[in-house]
Amino acid sequence: MSRTPGRLIVAALLIAALTGGATACTPADTPPPAPSSPSAASPTPTASGATLKPDGDAEDNLPLFTAVMRAVWKTDDKVKGRAYIDALAEAGFDVQTMQVTRDETSVGNPADSIQFSVLWKDECLVGQVGPSTKKPTAVVLPALPDERCLVGETREIDWTPGG
């Protein structure tokens, strides 16, 4: 896989922002779903009062993304990527624009952290949670040149969120 200098810079920024420095990445096995426009579903307010802003940019939707992430973090499923994807879909984000990393390592141990993302127009809402993180973290980052948000292998979202 060929990498451009710009892609390497974005990848380094993403890794540094989410992990504080060190993480292992492998090339992605499968391409992400084609990006689509943000969901036009009616906004669902959260306990924090945040709502989806379909006409807004990623920064405008960061409060909702963060509120959803924090709500899941308080549950027993706080280190399950599927819980974040389901909750984000329920809040109105388009599952076709999401990515999530695996909950377990290749030998079946719990992952030190998981990342999940929503491609929003030309930016990414990215969250990271897990035992190695001090607290749930959400940021807005530029999309990668291939219209992805996460570097490395991600888990296929092969279920119907909420189902």
Image (tube, helix red, strand yellow):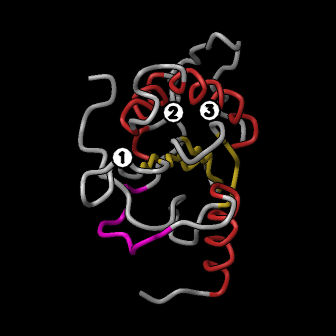
Left/right placement of residue 156 relative to residue 8 reads: left
Badge number at residue 52: none
> Does residue 129 show up magenta in the picture?
no
Alpha-carbon distance for marks 2 and 3?
9 Å
Q: Is the magenta stretch mostly helix, strand or loop?
A: loop
Q: Which of marks 3 and 1 is nearer the N terminus?
A: 3
Disc 1 and disc 2 in contact, CB within 8 angstroms? no
Does 75 sit above or below residue 23?
A: above
Q: In which quarter of the image is the C terminus?
A: top left
The residue that disc 2 covers is: 93
Tell which circle, 1 or 2, labels the residue nearer the N-terminal end.
2
Is the N terminus in the top left, top right, bottom left or bottom right quadrant? bottom left
Which of disc 3 and disc 2 is earlier in sequence? Answer: 3
Q: Which amino acid does label 1 sit on?
A: Pro
- Indicate the amino acid at tag 3: Phe
Residue receiving disc 1: 110
Q: Which residue does the image show at 46% across and 37% down from the upper left?
A: 94
**Looking at this rendering, what residue extends furthest in the top direction?**
47
Callout 2: SS: loop
